[in-house]
Amino acid sequence: MQKPTPKNEEIILDPKRYIVSKTDEKGVITYGNDYFVEISGYKESELIGQPHNMIRHPDMPRVVFKLMWDRIQNGQPIMALVKNMAKDGRYYWVVTEFESKRDKLTNKIISYTAFRKAAPRDAIKAIEPVYAKLREIEAQSGMEGAQNYLLGFLEDKGLSYDEYINQLVGNKGLFKIFFAAMKKLFG
Ligand SMILES: Cc1cc2nc3c(=O)[nH]c(=O)nc-3n(C[C@H](O)[C@H](O)[C@H](O)COP(=O)(O)O)c2cc1C
């Protein structure tokens, strides 16, 4: 499917609702809840069976997804701030927790789930220049340069990636509690 042209217009999310999607082990969408479908602007049938990068916004640095995949392929969860693009080119920001699920018998990873909620305004304000810088470095010197910049940036702050994201989204771990509850429902 043709990718939409990004529009500089934001979709304001309902802070009470959550956006959930699941993929197979390759990142192909297998499920989306009602709000995921609604906000994406696509029909459910247009989403299922497509690679999850179909809602990727070009402002998102590749290095963020690399970090995410490295983590979930190891069976560990990760929380990230993500800017996504709807079918009409508008964008929305979400705090996203990515999780993996293993087969109980073989212990192999069989699927991934993402839980998302509206991102706090100040977290978006803080991350925008960081992502813009990472995109700039990626364009100039590729993913490795961006990864080095990100590591240096975090080292300067004395924080791990997770600590940094936790600090940005704040709420005294409320997101973590929320995502844990979601996992019980959808996991
Ligand atoms: C469960 C799950 C949910 C995902 N959700 C998103 C998402 O909301 N937005 C996004 O851009 N990528 C998402 N991805 C990552 C994409 O698969 C892809 O790695 C990313 O869009 C980068 O695209 P690229 O590999 O073509 O550069 C998700 C992956 C998984 C496993």
Image (spheres, helix red, strand yellow):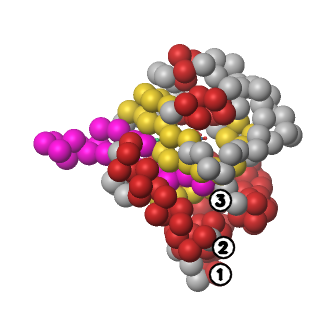
Q: CA distance from mark 2 to mark 1?
A: 5 Å
Circle 1 packing at 10 Å, graded few (<14), some (14-19), many (20+), is few
- Residue at the spot of label 3: 146
162 horizontally vs 24: left or right: right
Whether 54 is among the magenta residues is: no
Q: Nearer the viewer, residue 96 or 12?
A: 12
Could you tell me which residue is drawn at 78 percent across and 35 percent down? 90
170 horizontally vs 90: left or right: left
Residue 174 position, x and y percent, is 53, 66
- Residue at the spot of label 2: 153
Q: Is residue 24 above or below residue 187?
A: above
For this orientation, the residue located farthest to the right is 8
Could you tell me which residue is drawn at 38 percent across and 45 percent down? 185
Q: Secondary structure at mark 2?
A: helix
Residue 36 position, x and y percent, is 58, 34
Whether 104 is among the magenta residues is: yes
Q: Quadrant of the C terminus?
A: top left
Residue 119 position, x and y percent, is 67, 56
- Can you tell me whether the CB of the residue at mark 3 lies under 8 Å from the nearest atom of ligand 1? no
Q: Kindly tell me whether residue 146 is visible in this rendering.
A: yes
CB-based contact (under 8 Å), mark 2 and mark 3: no
CB-based contact (under 8 Å), mark 2 and mark 1: yes
- Residue at the spot of label 1: 156
Circle 2 packing at 10 Å, graded few (<14), some (14-19), many (20+), is some
The circle on residue 112 is none
Q: Secondary structure at mark 3?
A: helix
Q: Quadrant of residue 129?
A: bottom right
- The amino acid beneath tag 1 is Asp
Task: Count numbered badges in the picture.
Answer: 3
